[in-house]
Image (cartoon, helix red, strand yellow):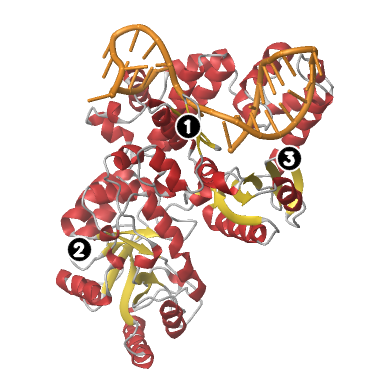
Amino acid sequence: MTNEEIAHVFEAIADLLEIKGESIYRVISYRRAAESIRAQGRRLEDLQREGRLKEIPGVGEAIAAKIDELLTTGKMDFYERLADEVPPGLIDVLRISGVGPKKAARFWKELGVTTVPELEAAARAGKLRELPGMGARSETAILESIERMARRQEGRIGIGIARPIAERLAEKLRHLPGVEVAEPAGSVRRWRETVGDLDLLVAAVSPEEVLRSFVAFDEVERVLGQGDTKASVEVVGGLRVQLWVHPPDRFGSALQYATGSQAHNVGLRERALERGLSLSEHGLKRSEGGEILCAREEDVYRALGLPWIPPELRENLGEIEAADAASLPTLVGESDLQGDLHAHTDWSDGRATVEAMAEAARELGSSYLAITDHSPSLGALNGLSVARLRQQRQEIDRVQKRIGGSLKLLQGAEVEILADGHLDYEDEVLAELDLVIASLHVSLRQPQAQITERLMGAIRNPHVDMIGHPTGRLLGSRAASDVDLESVFSAAADHGVVLEINAQPDRLDLNDAYARRAWQVGCLLAINTDAHRPDEFRLRRYGVGMARRGWLPGLAVLNTRSADEVVGWLRGRG
DNA sequence: GCCGTTTTCGGCCCGACTGTTTTCAGTCG
């Protein structure tokens, strides 16, 4: 059972308990545990074996016992009894915007509604408006919300799509009269791998004007709500966008608030209370009266006795404590990257020549680039035979001469780890290469022991320098392979093999939690674009986002080193 | 249900918006 699956069960428990009318704090406890489980870079079954489940923040006696039962028996008595009591179909009813636990419970108890289709039928029959506190408008709103939900397939969209939309909208907002600052906030600013909606923040003196212009943007398909200081709209594709407008002298607290995460904000507010302060998006209030205005985010953190915390860390996963202890890491930044160690050309499945890729890398300021095309077993991807691999070396040398010394070209390969664990080139061929990445593209659903051993075998091969996209997941379409990453990390650390953070937005593999864990146990990482076209080198920022979310300093990332250092490092490995 | 320089019990974040209301509950972020 994966951490994700276990977290999902606890979220379902939280929803059902909330509908049942249980103490909200008990509900919050289950939600917090679920979030915390998701953020673990380790499998719960490993932690269970070591008796360390209770070390997970938000997991105490009761929840640890429930995880234990789930892992041991595959079931949980408490959850099953709860599901008998409260129909689980109501969890989907909660997803309808405008419906929370109170209304869901009322629909269930007073109308016998247990699923979304049943709720839709009841609404069409005009039964909802008969309930106290409900009217015809609520009924219509619920029907519209159900329709929207049906139209929109995916709940969350990838950062690779969301981030550019957010940046474009922010740019449009900046051009409106009276707008001093416009910034994306929310999970997009924290570089989460997927986002549920976009949050945008504007500093302006007259909010009405900005909000009026915003809801009239071409992209806006419908206005979901609009008040004096904020508006919520749906843009093309069903993506929800919220805009907050705040006065410039309160922009810092507003940006801090809108950036979240919710868990981080709760942590800060608790800290504020300890200091006789009350924190909101408007600033800080002193309990004895008086207010602290925060024009900049730094002002908020300073008032709480903390250094500014980078948005990528704001998940309440130890960053507040680390800030308090002045031990926040100096995170790797995009400008720290000096080269890219994973890219394809038209020799295999890339779309551009070696030369075009080299030029593009150089334009982006890289001082080295490893060309790493596929190996022959990947026929569909035009993998290189040994003969073609050697020809490619000539071509790389030719391009190197032509472009001169400002960009060092390396010849590598992304070598397939075959289903039986063998590598796709013989050792003598691997020895000719400057850099060897070993990756899995086939037989990704092998049982854990088998697929883990494939990776371990590759790591033990002295010619292998790096493991590419270690889990093989594709966001939204393919789950991670069942790899025992803890063993892989430990072997990689022992053999000095680098683990990739693949920056393709649908991969982001390793993810934040695993990257953090890998660095913690002594692995070196690399942020690679796996570019197949010249413009894809720009995707590196998504890899950097993941690395920063994984608390990585520049030191943890091989390609923050200079060309000479990387070449020296590779030679040193033989 | 968790947690602890207010510690083993009693706390547990804050405000806007909406729709239904004559003062507020529910939802949302």
User: Image height check: is A321 above or below A395?
Assistant: above
**Residue identified by numbered label 3:** A226
Quick one: label 2, few (<14), some, or many (20+) residues within 10 Å?
A: some
For the question of whether residue A48 can be seen, the reply is yes
Could you tell me if the residues under marks 1 and 3 are in contact, i.e. CB atoms within 8 Å? Answer: no
Q: Position of residue A213 (x, y in %)?
A: 75, 53
Picture residue at 41% right of the left edge, 68% below the top: A378
Q: Element at badge 1?
A: helix
Which of the numbered marks, if any, corresponds to residue A461?
2
Return the disc, 3 or 2, that comes first in the chain's sequence: 3
Chain of residue at mark 3: A
- Closest to the camera, between mark 2 and mark 1, is 1
Query: In the displayed structure, does residue A46 sit left or right of residue A377?
Result: left
Q: Position of residue A16 (x, y in %)?
A: 55, 20
Q: Element at badge 2?
A: loop
Picture residue at 34% right of the left edge, 90% below the top: A404
Query: In the displayed structure, does residue A129 sit left or right of residue A400?
Result: right
**CA gap, disc 2 to disc 1?**
38 Å
Q: Position of residue A452 (x, y in %)?
A: 29, 49
Q: Identify residue type, mark 3.
A: Gln
Return the disc, 2 or 1, that comes first in the chain's sequence: 1
Picture residue at 81% right of the left edge, 15% below the top: A130
- Closest to the camera, between mark 1 and mark 3, is 3
**Residue identified by numbered label 1:** A8
Q: Identify residue type, mark 1.
A: His
- Closest to the camera, between mark 3 and mark 2, is 3
Co-location on one chain, circles 3 and 2:
yes
